């Protein structure tokens, strides 16, 4: 049994389930897909392959006892993605909103999915840091629990703005034309290293070579099709050596996340470089 787990937005669960089944058919082993609860599941031998956020990956990769290795990363369609394994955090408002950029949002009602999110929380904190601001920049914060709920609050007028994983938003806007017409992207935060597919190090030997072969972009044309216009191709580790080259990921992966919490709470720690 080859055990997959997703640690990403639930809106793409069906896509990850298809991928798990497709890979299982190619390698000749049954597969399962669970919703991951903790990245410790890799070290605990509960997960073989995972869809995870880019920031936790680069943090794990820098640790001496990293339990995973990079298997493959999606390259999204769209000129802004530059044929690289990156994505953005799109700042959205209602179409009739007076806000036109992130710089206009002082005092707004800001929605975010959760504090464990790179695109919804830490990248926002990094963007505030770049501007010498703290969370007091926003008038009020609302934790929603998911990107989907954050979008809903903006549409319903219960929040002024939010930041959404650009991959998740691309899919949402394409699937929901009415809602798409009621929203406007006013800024892009990033880029960041895109959520990759990782494999547990020392996975059962019978799985390793078939997995790496199946996951290469040349053999995943059917997987690419289910993403439609969202994914250009999937690239193997050799082609993603620059995975951690994006400034936001470099900054955040080089510091304990508590440092970021210190910053966004408005505290200043010169020794840690927070301003």
Image: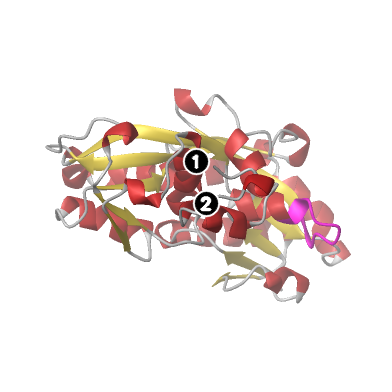
Which span of residues is magenta-colored?
60-69
**Label 1, label 2: how many angstroms apart (C-alpha)?**
8 Å
- Asked if residue 66 is among those painted magenta in the image, a careful observer would answer yes
Q: Please tell me which residue is depicted at 26% across the width and 52% down the height of the picture.
A: 139
Query: Is 121 located above or below residue 204 in the figure?
Result: above
> Marks 1 and 2: CB-CB under 8 Å?
yes
Question: Is 153 on the left-hand or right-hand side of 168?
Answer: left
Instruction: Residue at 49% x, 57% y: name it.
Output: 117
The residue pinned by badge 2 equals: 263
Indicate the quadrant containing the N terminus: top left, top right, bottom left or bottom right.
Answer: bottom right
> Which element is circle 2 on?
helix
Choose top left, top right, bottom left or bottom right for residue 51.
bottom right
Q: Nearer the viewer, residue 126 or 198?
A: 126
Sooner in the amino-acid sequence: mark 1 or mark 2: 1
- Report if residue 234 is visible in the image: yes
**Whole-percent x and y of residue 123?**
49, 45
Instruction: In this rendered view, identify the residue nearer to me: 246 or 104.
Output: 104
Residue depicted at x 51% and y 43%: 126
In the image, which disc is placed on residue 239? none
Instruction: In the rendered structure, find residue 129 and report the number of the disc placed on it.
Output: 1
Q: Nearer the viewer, residue 67 or 235?
A: 67
* Residue 252, horizontal then vertical, whole percent: 62, 47
Q: Position of residue 206 (x, y in %)?
A: 85, 63
- What secondary structure is marked by label 1? helix
């Amino acid at each position: 049994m080859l055990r997959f787990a997703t640690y990403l937005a639930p809106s793409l669960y069906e896509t990850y389930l298809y991928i798990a089944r497709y890979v299982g058919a190619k390698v000749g082993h049954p597969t399962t897909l669970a919703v991951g609860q903790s990245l410790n599941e890799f070290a605990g031998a509960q997960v073989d392959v995972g869809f995870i956020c880019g920031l936790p990956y680069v943090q794990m990769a820098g640790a001496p006892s990293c339990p995973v290795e990079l298997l493959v990363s999606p390259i999204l369609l769209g000129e802004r993605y530059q044929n690289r394994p990156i994505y953005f955090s799109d700042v959205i408002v209602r179409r009739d909103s007076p806000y036109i950029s992130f710089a206009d949002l002082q005092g707004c009602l800001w929605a975010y999915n959760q504090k464990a999110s790179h695109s919804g929380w830490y990248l926002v904190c990094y963007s505030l840091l770049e501007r010498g601001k703290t969370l007091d920049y926003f008038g009020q914060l609302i934790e929603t629990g998911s990107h989907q709920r954050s979008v809903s609050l903006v549409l319903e007028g219960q929040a002024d703005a939010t930041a959404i994983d650009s991959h998740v938003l691309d899919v949402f806007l394409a699937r929901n034309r009415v809602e798409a017409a009621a929203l406007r992207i006013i800024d892009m935060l990033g880029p960041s290293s895109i959520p990759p597919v990782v494999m547990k190090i020392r996975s059962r030997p019978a799985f390793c070579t078939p997995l790496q072969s199946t996951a290469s972009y040349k053999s995943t044309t059917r997987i690419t099709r289910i993403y439609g216009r969202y994914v250009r191709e999937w690239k193997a580790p050799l082609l993603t050596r620059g995975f951690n080259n994006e400034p936001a990921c470099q900054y955040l992966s080089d510091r304990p996340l508590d440092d970021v919490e210190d910053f966004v709470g408005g505290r200043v720690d010169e020794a840690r470089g927070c301003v």
